[in-house]
Image (spheres, helix red, strand yellow):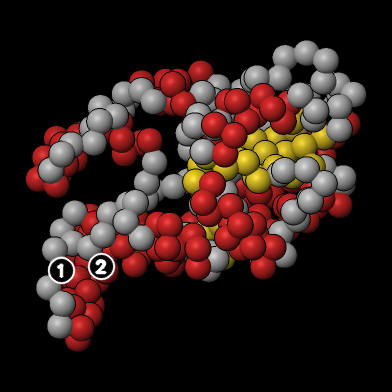
Amino acid sequence: MKSRNLIYLSSVFYLFAAHISATGEKIDNSVQAQSMLAVLYAQSSAEYEANNLQTFAGAKLALEKALVNKNWTAAIEQKEDFSEKPPAVILDIDETVLNNIPFQARAIIKGESYPNGWVEWMLEEASTSVAGVYEFLKYADSKGIKIFYVTNRIAIAEEATRNNLKKLGLPFDTDRDVLLMKNENGWTSDKVSRRELIAQDYRILLLIGDQLGDFISLDEATSGMYSRKEVAAKYEEMWGKKWFIITNPIYGRWEASIYNNEYPDTESELMQMRLKALKP
């Protein structure tokens, strides 16, 4: 197994080197290349695809239970007087509904780090859908469930994001704002206020996302590398029942926690902190 992995890694770097040679560019992508296997896993593995299909299949089953149980809510912000409200689900967008792995691959090849190129990617409206989400959303829509997209994409990309969702044939209501963006109406990266807004008018059946902040406050989600696991365990009764999470091995608060939630100033320091975080 070890030798096979070495051969695989060698072939990947050979292909990258061939690309650089063909374009005549000299790019230092040593930091970005560290995420290469994670990107390749998300882009090409059957296991990643199956995990996403499994997540949305489980969410569909939970939806059926949630619809008939009027005392059911998935939002910890929703505490009372919700049983007679119409049903809704809340989904994050990136790596939950829309697949942006080609952007990640592009960043590695170009030696760019987020946020470089991100706005341009969103404006391309080129994201595909995450496996399983189309069928899940169509089912929810057929049951009369309001679908809200709560994302930390910035408001400048709202029209492009809306277009991208519609191009993929995903349900998108127009009778009210169902696409709640960061920087819109003063909203920050913390999604609590947006969930509270939806909870005023709807009973929230499920939450689906790829980051802890899609389910809890940003403050609680922003903790140390190991205490974040304790936070996950704190809500063990929610996972797979009312909360459904997509695995994201490429980016997120999990990486920020490696740096004590303060990204270092230099790439050298960043790489040193990554090495130090490894526990053999």
- Residue count near mark 2 (Cα–Cα under 10 Å), binned few <14, some 14–19, many ≥20: some
Of residues 249 and 116, which is closer to you in this image? 116
* 22 with respect to 40 (left or right): left
> Residue 110, which numbered label?
2
Q: Residue at x 64, y 63 (%)?
A: 163
Q: Earlier in the sequence, mark 2 or mark 1?
A: 1
Q: CA distance from mark 2 to mark 1?
A: 7 Å
Looking at the rendering, in which quadrant would you find the N terminus? bottom left
State the image coordinates of residue 213 (x, y, percent, origin top left).
50, 31
Q: Residue at x 69, y 63 (%)?
A: 166
Inspect this view and state whether residue 277 appears: yes
- Residue count near mark 1 (Cα–Cα under 10 Å), binned few <14, some 14–19, many ≥20: few
Amino acid type assigned to the residue bearing label 2 in the image: Lys
Inspect this view and state whether residue 59 appears: no
State the image coordinates of residue 161 (x, y, percent, origin top left).
59, 57
Quadrant housing residue 17: bottom left
Is 22 rendered above or below residue 192? below
> Residue 125, which numbered label?
none
Of residues 223 and 148, which is closer to you in this image? 148
Identify the residue under disc 1: 27
SS category of the residue bearing label 2:
helix
* Label 2 close to label 1 by CB (< 8 Å): yes
Of residues 200 and 63, which is closer to you in this image? 200
* 30 with respect to 256 (left or right): left
* 120 with respect to 147 (left or right): left
